[in-house]
Image (tube, rainbow, N blue to C red):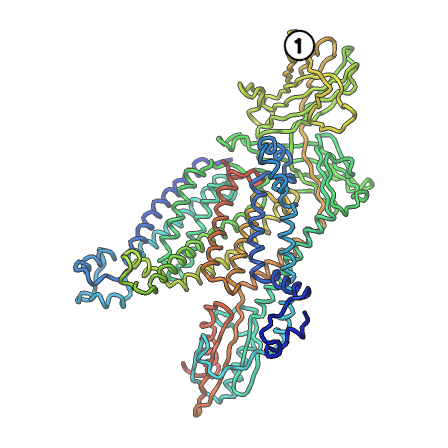
Amino acid sequence: MTDSRMDTRPDESDVTQPTLGPVGMLRWAWRQLTSMRTALFLLLLLAIGAVPGSIWPQRNIDAGRVADYLAHHRSTGPWLDRLGFFDVYSSPWFAAIYLLLFVSLVGCVVPRSRIHWRAMRAQPPRAPVRLERLPEHGQIEVDGAPEDVLQIARDVLRGRTFLSGHSLGSQWRLRSEGLSLSAESGYMRETGNLVFHSALIVVIVAVAVGHLFGWRGDRILVTGKSFSNTISAYDTFDPGPWVDTEGLSPFTVALDKLDVSFEEQAGGAQRGAARDFTAYTRTQASPQARQVSQILKVNGPLKFGGASLFLLGNGYAPVITVRDAKGQVLMHEATPFLPQDANYRSVGAIKVSAASPKQLGFFGFFLPSEYLDKDAGPSSFFPDLKNPALALGAYEGELYPQGRPQSVYTLSTEKMTQLRNAKGEPLRLLLKPGQTAELPDGRGSITFDSVQRWAGLSVRYDPGKVLALGGAVTALAGLIASLMIRRRRVFVRVRGEGRRTVVSIGGLAKGEDPGLRGTIEDLLRTIAERTGTRV
Amino acid sequence: MTNETLSLYANLGVYSAMVVFTIAMIAFAIDLAGAAPPVSSKADQPHKEPALVGAGDTVSSPVSPVPDDASDLPRRRKAAGIAMMLTRLGGLLLIAAAAMRGLSVQRPPLGNMFEFALVGCMFVVVIFVSISLRRDIRWLGLFVIGPVLLTLGLAITVFYTDASELLPSLKSVWLVIHVTVATFSVALFTIAFSVTILHLVKTWLEGLEGQDGQDAAGMSRIRIIVNTALPPARSLDRTAYGIHVVAFPLWTFTLIAGAIWAEQAWGHYWNWDPKEVWTFVIWVVYAAYLHARATTGWSARSANYLALAGYGCILVNYMVVNVFFVGQHSYSGM
């Protein structure tokens, strides 16, 4: 369907309904998509679509809780998973909503910008004949000739005289014709509106840039150790699709000390709540650079070029020594344990691959403030080190069956057997710092030397974040302009009445405008003052 | 670090404010009840009418008011005057309570559910009193002080948390910027919510009035009271829209400030944490409300339903997300 056919006059085409060809269909679909009604519908759909992500656990935030949920909900879980309820914000249906909204946004902003561009350069319309018919109207009789009074009105509107109820920065565009004057203001309202919507597009682009070129790496670093910014140094590394993983900036971070403190004074749920974490680090921006001592805190990340280093977690790493029957050291190192609850009951595994003939593995809990719970077994009553203890079970056999990769915090026991004590019960060890336990049948001994802390460090690089912030702030400025500025037209007409002049002013606004009356009254008053008329 | 005595005084301040607001609420209710013109057909009306306005009301004119003239004279609203005075007093008590709570822990009182509720109520009353200095909004008093009283009651019983220090992630200047503005805009949304509900009620009443066979005389007494006490639906609608228009940019600012803070504390400006999700949902719903207002074909009433939905989301964000959803914003202290 072409434009010429659409313009066909009714008398030529009679009553035949115009049929839509493919182009017409496309145009129709485009109109539908970019209509305000659809935008509104998509907005509400976006709101509803975002909600499930707050109700169900999300893989990108906490994969462990998702696995837990699936284990507990065997019938509904898999269906929810198939529908993407555990990856809401990367699911196809959520993407469909925001992509349609994005298209609708562009389809709205582009033509409106064109219209607004033209409107800004156009002259205000001619004053209507009967000003008293306009929504707001006022009249006054002043001294002076009509031409002079009109010139005064023009000066008042052209100069930046403050008029009550009229937004600052909202200039009047004037058009004079004979003894009447048309003024229009508030173009900034639509400008603000367009700026707001365009800035939202910028924010979306910035998010996409961050996704494509950004990366994050997480690392658990025990005090006294250091790491450098290479992929292999991270426990987990999550690069965007277009990241050059070879070109990471070569900084290093050494952790000297980690200070923590927890709430001891308040009772109830507040007791044991975290109060302060401070990490003392030595950093080097590159291998050639000077070493700098820097303090890393929870709300105070360290910057390395575009990347930032955050302190996001902490925990304990018991230092353990395992010896064989002859007293030869098989393993001696600080092993990080992962906190499971608010009181830092932590799980971890100690893997002694050097043990022979069979490899040894220990699995269990580290408890900063140990007590024996009747139901849960060894537990912790406070997150700080008040009564540190290790509660372990021991295994022997093959640590890494078929060399498969596994978590350092758990022991894969499929090719291992549990060690038993003389009575034939599974061996359970409870060690305090400094204590050593002999393993049964001459397998050697295990010593719990001391406790160190570890810091959970996260390095993030997001090249889109400055753009996102700029877009968001611009959007806010545009939003305020579009909501606060009013689009209004004011018409002035003067008529000679003997030696005096009757000034008649009418005004109308787009939408509700409670301040317009005040503006017109103020305008009349100002004209009266400037002409020297006593009111 | 925590000054127990000061925090007890803060609680005392909240209790006193609640007593003051209760009396204010009753006074507002009495004022509204006296709004309706007396029904001339009833013989005992001339006796009843002055009693509703206030027993101490002295009429300077020796001539007893004729029922027909009563509607022309501006009503003397002694009860409303008392209610406004008490509201100001209650507001001062809340400001004092919030200040003492903050001093007791040497930080801004914006760290847990109790403190959010306290500061939120304080803002609602302060905004209400500020608007009342410029415009007569005594008709709104009951519908603002009522929710405030309810929230304070919940805060001091259900949400109450002992005064204590903050979590490390909360120790930032952004706490003051982000949470203050969030609480302030929620206070605005709360007032706008009350006005929106009144608008819907008033629209409904005006619709009844316009129906054939039913004029003002056919309406029950309570309907007449509500109908006369409230401003016209159009003006209610304009007021509600005006407040929303101020609250929405502030909410946008909350969202941006929260993102900046999240970038500093957690390493990324947007993590789809439940609180972030709901803040975003609220923003989208109110954005839809503003779009609906600008869309031809959407009546003010259907747009207003969206505003109500937006406020429902605010309640979810405050009461459900803080307490039940697992996320990084778990600061309820419960």
Q: Pointer 1: residues within 10 angstroms few (<14), some, or many (20+)? A: few
Toward which corner of the image does residue A101 lie, by quadrant?
bottom right
Element type at marker 1? loop
Residue A3 sits in which quadrant? bottom right
Please state the horizontal and vertical placement of residue B70, each as a whole percent of the image.
Answer: 24, 65
Q: Nearer the viewer, residue A16 or B19?
A: A16
Please provide percent x and percent y for residue A93.
63, 48
* Residue located 44% across and 54% down the image: B193
Q: Residue A508, position in %: x, y?
A: 49, 74
Observer-nearest residue: A474 or A62?
A62
Q: Check disc 1 and give the amino acid type.
A: Asn
Note whether A6 is above or below B86 in the view shown: below
Furthest residue toward bottom: A498
**Left or right: B23 in relation to B300:** left
Is B29 displayed left or right of A180 in the figure?
A: left
Mark 1, chain letter? A
Figure quadrant of residue A113: bottom right
Vertical position of residue A10 compared to residue B200: above or below: below
Please give the residue where the numbered disc 1 appears in the rendered image.
A421
Q: Nearer the viewer, residue A457 or B324?
A: B324
How many numbered marks have been drawn onto this rendered protein structure? 1
Residue A203 percent coordinates (x, y): 65, 55
Regarding residue A165, the answer to whether it shows in the image is yes
For image coordinates 53% across by 68% down, the residue present is A486
